[in-house]
Amino acid sequence: MRMEWPEWWEWDLAFTAHLEDRMKVRLFSEVDLRAMLHDATRLEPSARPGRWIVYTRFAGRPWAVVVEPDSDEQQLYVVTAYGRETER
């Protein structure tokens, strides 16, 4: 079954300062992040209202990317990304 992505999935990406810090620590680049989003398999609401968790893979391991769509600016803010220990 094909995943139905929300309208904001196609909006331009914007990166938070928090994400930029995590990119350095977790050793991934903007190109890696864009590839993770392109290869995403699932999306679910985060515990924090207005945010979503994107499930994907990076370097052969499961990862999660937290995004927050901004309908006023029509931008998709990438808040953070992190490796997950197990598949969900």
Image: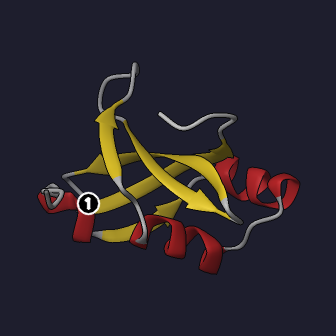
Is 45 on the left-hand or right-hand side of 29? left
Give the residue type at disc 1: Glu
Is 35 on the left-hand or right-hand side of 26? left
Looking at the picture, does residue 26 appear above or below residue 87? below
Report x, y in % for residue 3.
18, 57
Report x, y in % for residue 70.
28, 50
Q: How many marks?
A: 1
Q: Residue at 33% of width from left, 48% of height from top?
A: 42
Mark 1 nearby-residue class (10 Å; few <14, some 14–19, many ≥20): few
The part of the image, by quadrant, that contains residue 28 is bottom right
The quadrant in which the N terminus is found is bottom left
Is 13 on the left-hand or right-hand side of 44? right
Coloring scheme used? secondary structure
Report x, y in % for residue 18.
68, 46
Check the image and name the residue furthest to the bottom. 31
Q: Residue at 65% of width from left, 38% of height from top?
A: 84
Looking at the picture, does residue 84 appear above or below residue 25? above
Looking at the picture, does residue 31 appear above or below residue 66? below
- Secondary element under disc 1, as helix, strand or loop, is loop
Check the image and name the residue furthest to the top. 47
Q: Residue at 30% of width from left, 49% of height from top?
A: 69
User: Which residue matches tag 1?
Assistant: 73
Looking at the picture, does residue 34 appear above or below residue 51? below
- Viewer-side residue, 62 vs 5: 62
Q: Residue at 65% of width from left, 52% of height from top?
A: 19
